[in-house]
Amino acid sequence: MASLQATYPDHFWADPATFFEDGALASIAADFGLMPSLFEPSGLVREEFFAAGTPLVCSRAGGLRERVADYDERSRKGSGLTFSGHSHSALMSSLERALALYAQPEHYAALRRNAYAAACDVSDTAWHWQCEIERLLACKQPPWLHAGVLLNGEDGA
């Protein structure tokens, strides 16, 4: 991040020390969010972009496929641009389409509105992650804790 900021001071913002405090500013200031993920189980970063009204250019992996709708110029519906195949040409094609939409203010404004409207409350996702973490932590406990048996052989009743 420091190298990108030094190389592109007018086009790249970064302050790792305050990212979680001021990171939303980067999402708001971005014209598009880019997520060429091979694996994306929950999509919390996607929701950060949507909450900022920033449309995505992303792969159709996991949680991205489920929540990012391709923008349709006729209906003016959709919250981003997606691609399949994880190839350079697929990514470049989506980026070229993003630039073309950006050059059309009426479509770009609709795309930003749609991205903002697509944001959801992530408390449900956070709750599911907490449950999974608690399940995994329980798996790490010694077997005798699961069976209700104490170290001295007595049951836990």
Image (cartoon, helix red, strand yellow):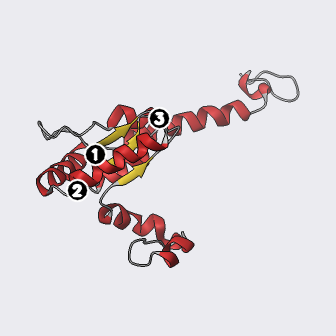
Report the residue marked by disc 3.
128
- Which residue does the image show at 14% across and 57% down from the upper left? 105
Residue at 19 percent across and 53 percent down: it is 108
Residue found at x 15% / y 40%: 73
The one of 75 and 45 positioned closer to us in this rendering: 75
Q: Is residue 35 left or right of residue 157?
A: left
Q: Quadrant of residue 149?
A: top right
Q: Is residue 128 left or right of residue 122?
A: right
Mark 3 or 2: in front is 2
Q: Are marks 2 and 1 in contact (CB under 8 Å)?
A: no
Residue pointed to by mark 2: 102
Q: Residue 74: tell me if it is visible.
A: yes
Determine the residue positioned at 40% across, 47% down: 92
Q: Give the x, y percent position of residue 8.
A: 45, 75
Residue 143's label in the rendered image is: none
Three-letter amino acid code at disc 1? Ala
Residue bearing mark 1: 119
Amino acid type shown at disc 2: Tyr
Q: Position of residue 3 (x, y in %)?
A: 56, 73
Q: Residues within 10 Å of mark 3 (few under 14, many from 20)?
A: few
Q: Quadrant of the C terminus?
A: top right
Q: Give the crowd class for mark 1: few <14, some 14-19, many >=20 residues within 10 Å.
A: some
